[in-house]
């Protein structure tokens, strides 16, 4: 009986310790940040932004609008602007070609870590561009 009690309290303590270590908060749903997804005729961009242990992660996927055609390689601009319009941070992610498929559409997942959290009401813009020219 005592062994079971200790094991039960040990499991409860371990689960509390593990849940308190990883704090993950969706910053868009909380209203702290605005997320703008720039769509075009070739792709659909989906994304989300969350805070985890004091750092920002922006992640999502890029899918072709017409899965039977596919999309050439390109790049994704992630730009974070403060409410005043000043650029807080930016990243550029090169993306491979999205292959054409008949049944299950191909897509690309992305994840971009940022060292700090932008001020409240900042805007994160995700914008896909065709080609590998990163100067756009």
Image (spheres, rainbow, N blue to C red):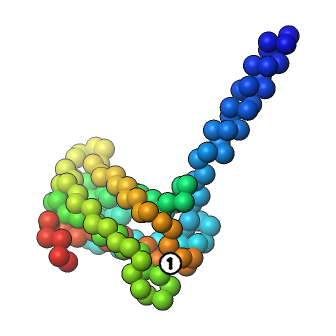
User: Relative to 118, is 1 on the left or the right?
Assistant: right
Dot 1 lies on which element?
A: strand
Q: Is residue 5 left or right of residue 21?
A: right
Q: Residue furthest bottom?
A: 84
Q: Residue furthest right?
A: 1
Residue beneath the point at 61% across and 45% down: 21
- Please tell me which residue lies in front, 93 or 11: 11
Name the residue tied to disc 1.
122
Which quadrant of the figure has residue 121?
bottom right
Residue 132 vs residue 61, the one in the foreground: 132
| Residue at 79% in and 19% down | 6
Q: Quadrant of the C terminus?
A: bottom left
Quadrant where the N terminus is found in the figure: top right
* Residue 36 visible here: no
Instruction: Give x and y (percent) for residue 58.
Output: 43, 61
Q: Residue 85, position in %: x, y?
A: 43, 87
Q: Residue at x 27, y 62 (%)?
A: 93
Q: Could you classify mark 1 by the number of other residues whose Cα lies within 10 Å: few (under 14), some (14-19), or many (20 or more)?
A: many
């Amino acid at each position: 009986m005592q062994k079971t009690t200790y094991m039960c309290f040990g499991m409860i303590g371990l689960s509390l310790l593990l849940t308190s270590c990883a704090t993950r908060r969706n910053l868009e749903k909380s209203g702290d940040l605005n997320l703008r997804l720039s769509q075009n005729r070739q792709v659909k961009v989906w994304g989300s932004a969350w805070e985890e242990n004091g750092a920002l992660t922006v992640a999502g996927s890029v899918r072709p609008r017409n899965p039977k055609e596919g999309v050439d390689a390109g790049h994704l601009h992630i730009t974070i602007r403060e409410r005043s319009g000043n650029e807080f941070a930016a990243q550029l992610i090169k993306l491979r070609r999205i292959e054409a498929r008949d049944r299950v559409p191909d897509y690309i997942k992305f994840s971009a870590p940022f060292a700090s959290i932008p001020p409240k009401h900042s805007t994160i813009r995700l914008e896909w561009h065709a080609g590998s020219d990163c100067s756009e």
